[in-house]
Image: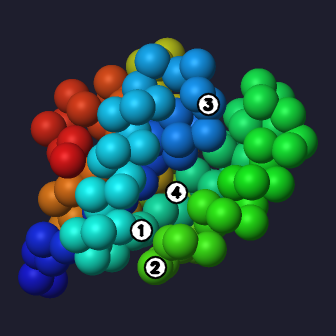
């Protein structure tokens, strides 16, 4: 599979910082998101990231922020990858192998998507993804 330089996977940490003006990465996040949109990147995420983001936004920022996310951010994605059984179990295997408390199933599934799709750009502030040197 060919590496597509215009593909960018977007993580929960980036999505949350776009909506939370008090987040330490909020200004940088807004700037980077605009650059991705203006640079005609293909914005990719997974339904697991959407689910995790939905729960986090509703719990920490409230229902109005969740509606903003649902109506103004989710439609911007060019592709939302729906995790099937195979991808779920690949992520679960990675989670079991790494056996780390700071690693989530969503992170592991995201790694699998990034590796399987050969995506070399990731919009994230999560240290787990940054350690993989995939941050854009």
At which x and y percent is residue 76? 53, 71
Indicate the quadrant where residue 39 lies: bottom left
Label 4–label 3 contact, CB within 8 A: no
Which residue occupies the foreground of this view, 102 or 49? 49
Q: Secondary structure at mark 1?
A: strand
| Residue that extends furthest to the right in the rendered view of this protein | 63
Q: Which residue is mark 4?
A: 89
> Is tag 3's residue or tag 1's residue first in the polypeptide sequence?
3
Q: Nearer the viewer, mark 4 or mark 3?
A: 3
> Is tag 4's residue or tag 3's residue first in the polypeptide sequence?
3
Q: How many marks?
A: 4
Q: Relative to residue 10, is residue 119 drawn left or right?
A: left
Q: Nearer the viewer, mark 2 or mark 3?
A: 3
Which residue occupies the foreground of this view, 52 or 30? 30
Q: Which residue is mark 1?
A: 44
Placement of 97 over or under 127, stated as above or below: below
Image quarter where the N terminus lies is bottom left
- Spatial distance from mark 2 to mark 4, Cα to Cα? 25 Å
Q: Nearer the viewer, mark 3 or mark 1?
A: 3
Q: Which residue is mark 3?
A: 20
Q: Secondary structure at mark 3?
A: loop
- Spatial distance from mark 3 to mark 1, Cα to Cα? 21 Å
Q: Relative to residue 127, is residue 76 drawn left or right?
A: right
Label 4–label 1 contact, CB within 8 A: no
Label 1–label 2 contact, CB within 8 A: yes
The residue shown at (58%, 19%) is: 22
> Is tag 2's residue or tag 4's residue first in the polypeptide sequence?
2
């Amino acid at each position: 599979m060919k590496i597509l330089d215009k593909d960018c996977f977007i993580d929960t940490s980036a999505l949350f910082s776009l909506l939370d003006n008090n987040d330490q990465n909020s200004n940088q996040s807004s700037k980077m998101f605009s650059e991705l949109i203006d640079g005609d990147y293909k914005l990719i995420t997974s339904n697991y990231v959407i689910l995790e983001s939905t729960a986090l936004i509703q719990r920490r920022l409230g229902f109005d922020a969740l509606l903003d996310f649902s109506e103004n951010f989710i439609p911007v994605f060019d592709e939302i990858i729906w995790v099937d059984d195979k991808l779920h179990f690949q992520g679960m295997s990675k989670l079991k192998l790494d056996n780390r408390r700071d690693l989530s199933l969503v992170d592991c599934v995201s790694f699998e998507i990034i590796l399987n799709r050969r995506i070399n750009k990731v919009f994230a502030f999560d240290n787990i993804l940054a350690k993989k040197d995939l941050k854009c």
